[in-house]
């Protein structure tokens, strides 16, 4: 019981601290650069779950998004299949390269979500910001995706490594 209470207190403390990027228009350029590095570092340190797509709430088959800043790799789940690929970023923009995916068959609603998500993410660029516990992605000043911090237990690092080595495709074909 004590371990469970300690875990819950730790989880609440992490959520309370969260990621918080607030623009400071008076800051010197060097300070802005540090703030932007901090924002991307915060983005990388979390696993994200899609909660809104083109203004509509997503509550089923929620895609996830994870970043490996050192390797410039992105990975996650489309709500049906695993995906992986490269990305680049600067102070305000994230650009995704072509994504690879596993190819499992899923229910029709999951496949529809996957198609929407893949169409938006694959080889696209977004302006981004981090506010409280959300990662917001914009195209042409329109908010197109909102991700919340994903607190569900997952072994996304293992899924990422598996997908990059091709093992995920082999497993999907079985």
Image: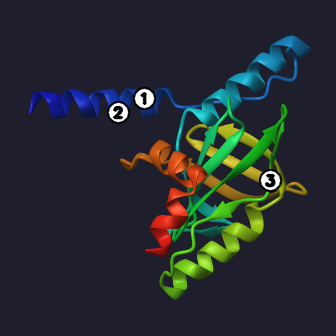
The structure residue drawn at horizontal position 11% and vertical position 27%, both measured from the top left corner, is: 2
Q: Mark 3 points at which residue?
A: 97
Question: Gap in Å between the C-alphas at discs 2 and 3?
Answer: 33 Å
Relative to 169, 34 lies left or right: right
Instruction: Report the number of discs.
Output: 3
In which quadrant of the rendered image does the N terminus lie? top left
The structure residue drawn at horizontal position 70% and vertical position 68%, both measured from the top left corner, is: 118
Q: Out of 122 and 92, give the one closest to the viewer.
A: 122
Residue 38 percent coordinates (x, y): 68, 23
The structure residue drawn at horizontal position 51% and vertical position 57%, both measured from the top left corner, is: 167
Q: From the viewer's perspective, is residue 48 above or below residue 142? A: above
Q: Name the residue under label 1.
A: 14
Residue 68 percent coordinates (x, y): 63, 36
Residue 132 percent coordinates (x, y): 59, 37
Q: Label 1 near label 3: C-beta < 8 Å?
A: no
Q: Give SS at disc 1.
A: helix
Q: Label 3 near label 2: C-beta < 8 Å?
A: no
Q: Give SS at disc 2.
A: helix
Residue 5, located in which quarter of the rendered image?
top left
Q: From the viewer's perspective, is residue 157 above or below residue 11? A: below
Q: Label 1 near label 2: C-beta < 8 Å?
A: yes
On the question of residue 62 being in view, the answer is: no
Question: Gap in Å between the C-alphas at discs 2 and 1?
Answer: 5 Å
Residue 75 percent coordinates (x, y): 60, 50
Residue 66, located in which quarter of the rendered image?
top right
């Amino acid at each position: 019981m004590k371990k469970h209470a300690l875990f819950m207190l730790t989880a609440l403390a992490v959520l309370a601290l969260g990621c918080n990027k607030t623009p400071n228009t008076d800051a010197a350029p060097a300070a802005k650069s540090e703030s932007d590095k901090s924002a991307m570092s915060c983005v990388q340190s979390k696993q994200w779950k899609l909660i809104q797509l083109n203004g509509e709430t997503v509550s089923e088959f929620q895609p996830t998004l994870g970043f490996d800043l050192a390797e410039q790799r992105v990975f996650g789940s489309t709500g049906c299949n695993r995906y992986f690929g490269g990305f680049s970023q600067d102070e305000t923009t994230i650009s995704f390269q072509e994504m690879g995916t596993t190819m499992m068959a899923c229910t029709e609603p999951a496949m529809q979500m996957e198609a929407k998500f893949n169409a938006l993410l694959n080889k696209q660029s977004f302006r981004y910001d981090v506010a409280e516990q959300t990662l917001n992605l914009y195209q042409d000043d329109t908010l197109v995706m909102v991700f919340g911090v994903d607190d569900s237990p997952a072994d996304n690092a293992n899924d990422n490594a598996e997908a990059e080595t091709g093992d995920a495709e082999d497993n999907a074909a079985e």
